Image (cartoon, rainbow, N blue to C red):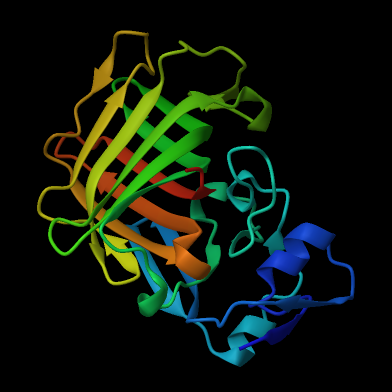
Amino acid sequence: MKTVLKIGMGLAIVSLAACGGSETEVEQDFEPGASGLIGLATSPASTNLVSLSAEEQSDLEGFLDPSDPRSLDGDGQALTYVSAIDPDNGDRTKALLVTQQTLVSDLPSNSVVEYSGNARFDLSGGGGNYTGVMGANLTASFGTEGAVVDVEFSDVDTGQGYIVNGASTTDTTGAEYIAISNLAITDNSFAAGDDTAIEVQGFASSTSSIDFSDATVQANGVFAGPNAEEVAGAVAASTSNDFKLFTTFSGAQSN
């Protein structure tokens, strides 16, 4: 089935991101599944995944942000089925991701798929507060049992506005690393599971760590486009010591 999508509609993520908002129509050879929003709120900490009606999709006109790193893959090319929304208040930690969700029948089976993209993060703990953009590498293991997504963030992008303890800086330790493992896949989405764990290293110093071993984790994510070509998600986590991690991320297949 061939669908003609018009710029400015919530479903037309590819055309807005690729064409910078020109008023042309684009033919897209993909039978769409659900279109939805992945949201992240930091107060109180929560994530959510919401399906959009046609009317709600049209209301997104003008809010998609093709320059946001989460609208781009790891090589800086525009994603086709995921795009970020620029929030009115400018608070990137609460920004939303728009997705064109993969049909369940179109998912890979019994295979490991790798993705490369970007993440926005807001981290507090270990004596510091850190906000910025990092490169994201994701691995999705599809199978009948134990299907999971593992996410790794590294290489802080200081050109995207790295904030440490309230001040912009270009100084990093070079060892900043965040890993979120064992997000459980169900059909064309994934969420926190019983075995989900978070590791945070290298922010205060190259050898420092922030203990998220007892964290309460919320997560929502989806696969997007034909054959799960892209991925997007959000994670909110907090510990008994009031350490907190909030992140939204996206990527495109790299293998």
Q: Is residue 129 above or below residue 68?
A: above
Pinpoint residue 239: horizontal percent, then vertical percent.
18, 40
In percent of the image, x 67 and y 82: which residue is there? 59
Judge from the rendering whether residue 220 lies leftward or rightward of residue 12; answer left or right.
Answer: left
Judge from the rendering whether residue 25 lies leftward or rightward of residue 119; answer left or right.
Answer: right
Q: Is residue 55 visible?
A: yes
Pinpoint residue 136: horizontal percent, then vertical percent.
47, 38
Q: Is residue 42 visible?
A: no
Q: Is residue 110 above or below residue 35?
A: above
Position of the N terminus by quadrant: bottom right
In percent of the image, x 42 and y 33: which residue is there? 153
Pinpoint residue 161: horizontal percent, then vertical percent.
64, 30
Residue that protrudes farthest toward the front in the picture: 110
Task: Tell me where residue 210 sits by quadrant.
Answer: top left
Judge from the rendering whether residue 220 lies leftward or rightward of residue 225; answer left or right.
Answer: left
Judge from the rendering whether residue 173 lies leftward or rightward of residue 244; answer left or right.
Answer: right
